[in-house]
Image (tube, rainbow, N blue to C red):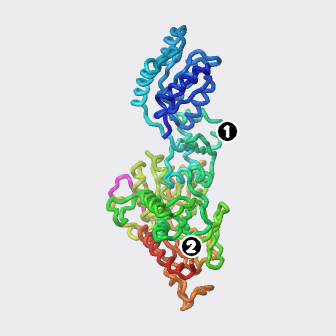
């Protein structure tokens, strides 16, 4: 966290150097000492500090300065930092003016030049003022801030990306400019061009990113976007539970391991508000906690985690070359595909147009706080939908689950069903589906079809969260590995048909249990054909796969 600032302003260079020297001698350990030679220069510093969301503890200002007096400066500065203490520096002849300024600008104290020795005439005064300031001052948030619009898909993607990568940020909604003094002050400090091109990401160092891509944002927040080596024993594509487990076991057993994740470690499980049936956690844990712990564990064993998207694979003898969207390429002996699945798109008029503006795929935990006193609709009947409904029930007035089937028993764990029924502001509507979404720049209403009565009801809605089906992200592997009609990857015995090994298979053995039709390319987790869609099974497959990787490497290395 940045230290609070002490800003001193004087047009006399000798005086300015002297006061800065004395301030640094006593307060440099706890405060940043800043100086300016004029009121106008000082205001530029103050504006920049406000944009960065830094704190100012004290203004120590000369009264008689050309262009802008000390009192005139303070009148402007305290609109941005009203809690800062104010001390006026005056000459002997200015004492009457200083006393008058106590009423005009709320001066806390005035000091007469010269103040030597500072131990008697400067430090006791400032010590008392800074002690009062520190006791009453609420700490400022000094991380990344995002200024945007709640209904902006770009704003939503940025918030979601930061949250899932465990990067603290402060959300500032432009629509609250009339009621939120902090938002209003920030908007007034920014250029008109900046506020017309939202969202803006404001970094702690003052750098402002206008509508940044996720790749650009990843670079600025310190995520690795390129590998440090050209070759690895094992490359893992996908950072969900299966990929993370494989990374931990692979690296802990001595394999040079790299994991490529295009969004954030944790996958769909990382977005779960509560996982209560994971072995060893009797009180449950959030998906974010599980992902965070796994990432720390993987890095401890030396796994290199890259924030990038894999786009293609090429095979050259024992080497598998992985091409990334940023133009980089890396090679490995063994490749493990753990890309998981995405939510299936809801095919209904208006849904695609309003996605990110009230309609979201997945739990979208970043939007939960915005749903206070609203009705939230959740589409889906599996565990992820139930966990999301429980989470939103803490914020929303009412949560309505829209379930296509006639019950939850076939797709949801019983403990979760019991929790849903016991939560008074959760309502479950069976035999229902969303057939249309309505709204101009954001979701305003949805049309719900009931298959029992064949009626369509149009109801007000600002938030719709869709968690239906599963679509694997494997198009980039289409000409390399064998997939089923939905895109899930075949492995092991699934590849042997009528006693015949897969086309092109040249090894004198059957494909390993989690191996694809290409020797040395393995698949684990939800993306695998026939997998069990559970966190624990993904973790199990990821750990077991490392045994097959070792067997493969023992033959080719």
Which of the pair 171/221 is nearer the observer? Answer: 221
Q: Which residue is drawn at 61% across and 21% down?
A: 13
Q: Residues within 10 Å of mark 1 (few under 14, many from 20)?
A: few
x and y percentages locating residue 464 in the rendered image: 50, 55
How packed mark 2 is, by other alpha carbons closer than 10 Å (few <14, some 14-19, many 20 or more), is many
Residue 343 visible? The answer is: no
Instruction: Where is residue 507? Give x, y as percent.
Output: 58, 87
- Residue 335 disc label: 2
State the separation of the CA atoms marked 2 and 1.
46 Å
Percent x, y for residue 189? 60, 33
Task: From this view, report whether residue 242 is shown above or below residue 437.
Answer: below
Residue 55's place in the image compared with 71, above or below, is below
Decide which of 415, 408 is in the foreground and name it.
Answer: 415
Q: Earlier in the sequence, mark 2 or mark 1?
A: 1
Residue 226 is situated, as x and y percent measured from the top left of the image, at 61, 60
Q: Is residue 26 visible?
A: yes
Task: Tell me what residue is drawn at x 65 percent, y 74 percent.
Answer: 314
Q: Is 425 covered by the magenta stretch? A: yes
Residue 93, by quadrant, is top right
Q: Give the range drawn in magenta.
A: 422-430
Circles 2 and 1: CB distance less than 8 Å?
no
* Residue lying at the far bottom of the rendered structure: 499
- Left/right placement of residue 238 relative to residue 424 reads right
Name the disc covering residue 275, or none.
Answer: none
Q: Which residue is found at the position 59% from the left and 70% from the top?
A: 474
Instruction: Confirm whether the magenta stretch covers residue 431.
Output: no
Marks 2, 1: nearer the viewer: 2
Q: How many numbered circles does the render carry? A: 2
Q: Residue 193 carries which label?
A: 1
């Amino acid at each position: 966290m940045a230290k609070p600032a002490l800003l001193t302003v004087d047009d006399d260079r000798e005086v300015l150097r002297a006061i800065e020297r004395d301030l640094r001698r006593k307060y440099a350990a706890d405060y940043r000492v800043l100086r300016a030679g004029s009121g106008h220069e000082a205001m530029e510093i103050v504006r920049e500090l406000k944009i960065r969301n830094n704190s100012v503890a004290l203004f120590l200002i000369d009264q008689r300065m050309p262009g802008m007096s000390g009192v005139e400066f303070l009148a402007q500065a305290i609109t941005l930092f009203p809690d800062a203490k104010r001390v006026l520096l005056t000459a002997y002849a200015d004492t009457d003016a200083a006393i008058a300024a106590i009423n005009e600008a709320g001066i806390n104290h005035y000091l007469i030049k010269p103040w030597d020795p500072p131990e008697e005439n400067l430090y006791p005064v400032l010590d008392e003022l800074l002690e009062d300031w520190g006791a009453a001052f609420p700490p400022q948030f000094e991380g990344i801030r995002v200024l945007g619009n709640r209904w902006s898909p770009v704003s939503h993607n940025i918030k979601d990306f930061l949250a899932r990568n465990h990067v603290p940020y402060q959300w500032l909604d432009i629509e609250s400019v009339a009621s939120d003094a902090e938002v209003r002050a920030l908007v007034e400090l920014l250029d008109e061009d900046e506020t017309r091109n939202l969202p803006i990401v404001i970094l702690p160092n003052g750098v402002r990113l206008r509508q940044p891509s996720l790749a650009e944002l990843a670079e600025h927040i310190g995520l690795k976007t390129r590998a440090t080596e050209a070759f690895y024993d094992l490359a893992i594509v996908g950072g969900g539970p299966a990929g993370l487990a494989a990374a931990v076991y692979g690296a802990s057993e001595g394999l040079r391991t790299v994991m490529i994740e295009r969004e954030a470690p944790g996958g769909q499980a990382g977005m779960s508000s509560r996982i209560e049936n994971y072995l060893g956690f009797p009180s449950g844990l959030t998906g974010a906690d599980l992902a965070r712990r796994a990432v720390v564990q993987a890095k401890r064993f030396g796994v290199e985690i890259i924030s990038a998207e894999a786009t293609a694979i090429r095979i050259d003898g024992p080497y598998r070359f992985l091409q990334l969207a940023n133009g980089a390429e890396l090679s490995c002996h063994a490749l493990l595909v753990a890309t998981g699945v995405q939510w299936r798109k809801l095919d209904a008029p208006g849904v695609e147009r309003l996605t990110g503006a009230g309609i979201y795929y997945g739990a979208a935990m970043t939007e939960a706080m915005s749903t206070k006193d609203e009705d939230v609709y959740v589409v889906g009947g599996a565990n992820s939908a139930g966990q999301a409904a429980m989470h939103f029930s803490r914020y929303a007035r009412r949560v309505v689950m829209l379930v296509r089937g006639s019950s939850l028993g076939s797709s949801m764990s019983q403990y979760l069903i019991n929790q849903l029924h016991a939560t008074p502001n959760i309502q479950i509507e069976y035999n229902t589906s969303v057939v249309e979404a309505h709204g101009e720049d954001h979701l305003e209403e949805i049309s719900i079809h009931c298959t029992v009565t064949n009626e369509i009801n149009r109801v007000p809605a600002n938030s719709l969260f869709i968690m239906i089906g599963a679509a694997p992200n494997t198009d980039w592997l289409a000409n390399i590995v064998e997939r089923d009609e939905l895109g899930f990857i075949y492995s092991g015995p699934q590849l042997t048909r009528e006693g015949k090994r897969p086309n092109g298979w040249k090894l004198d053995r059957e494909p390993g249990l989690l191996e694809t039709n290409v020797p040395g390319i393995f698949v684990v987790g939800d993306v695998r054909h026939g997998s069990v869609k559970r966190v624990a099974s993904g973790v199990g497959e990821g750990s077991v796969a490392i045994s097959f990787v070792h067997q493969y490497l023992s033959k080719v290395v």
